[in-house]
Amino acid sequence: MLCPMFAVVLVVGLGPLLVGAFPQDAPKKTCRLSQYGSLVSSELMAVQKLREHFVDIMLLTDRKCSTRLFHRKWKPNELSVPDRLLLVEAELDLTVAVLAHPTVHKLAKMSQQPLAFLTQAREDLRGCVSVPLGLPAPARWHRRWWQRRGVSLVLTHMLSLQVAAEAPSHQPSGKLRHWLQKLETAKKTETAGCVEASIILNLFQVVNDLGCVAIPERCT
């Protein structure tokens, strides 16, 4: 067993390094999405009006796409919870970018309300993506290993944080990875008008996917 004096030396020696790696004044993000489980009628109406107005505009333009972004052979409820978060984050990133820079000036005003609450939803979702779900198994194993050797709880916690930080991030499933690749390809090969059409015509699907991560038990 390590003597108490040696444990203190370790704390003093490693403390500045580990504390520096995890600044105490870093803002803590929270994960709150329940408000997106059922949007208020005014927000849904704004989405509906935008979509209807866009359909009228599309009759006068050529917006054919070779990529069908929202044509998927699976549903979000078939994905794991981390995969669902990544899916909706990617959808919201693209949706916000499209609504913030419409290709037709007439859409700018009608896009404001959907853009506002979807931008807020994206920020709230990012809090959920970044919140750790608990220390991974290797960190817990290291904690017990060090405790058996007499290292103080302070140092144990520091070492756990270090292992957690070095743990690999979530890797998306094959289904989600394929769709994310499809999304990146569309961004590079399709016209801005095509991507805009894909997003606006499928805004309700984006809203439904957001509701799926907001209230998982209602996800169908």
Image: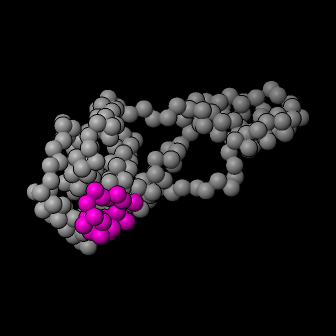
Image: magenta residue range: 99-119
Q: Is residue 80 magenta?
A: no
Residue 218 shows in the view: no
Res 200 → quadrant: bottom left
Identify which residue, 68 or 159, lies in the foreground: 68
Task: Name the residue located 61 percent from the left edge and 30 percent from the top edge.
Answer: 141
Identify which residue, 123 or 183, lies in the foreground: 183
Identify which residue, 121 or 38, lies in the foreground: 121
Identify which residue, 13 or 102, lies in the foreground: 102
Q: Residue 127, position in %: x, y?
A: 48, 53
Q: In this picture, is 123 found above or below 172?
A: below
SS majority, magenta: helix
Task: Name the residue located 22 percent from the left edge and 46 percent from the top edge.
Answer: 194
- Relative side of 70 to 7, left or right: left
Q: Residue 17, position in %: x, y?
A: 76, 38
- Relative side of 148 to 84, left or right: right
Task: Name the residue located 34 percent from the left edge and 57 percent from the top edge.
Answer: 101
- Relative side of 169 to 12, left or right: left
Q: In this picture, is 85 found above or below 165?
A: below
Res 160 → quadrant: top right
Q: Is residue 102 magenta?
A: yes
Task: Name the residue located 36 percent from the left edge and 40 percent from the top edge.
Answer: 83
Residue extending farthest to the bottom is 42
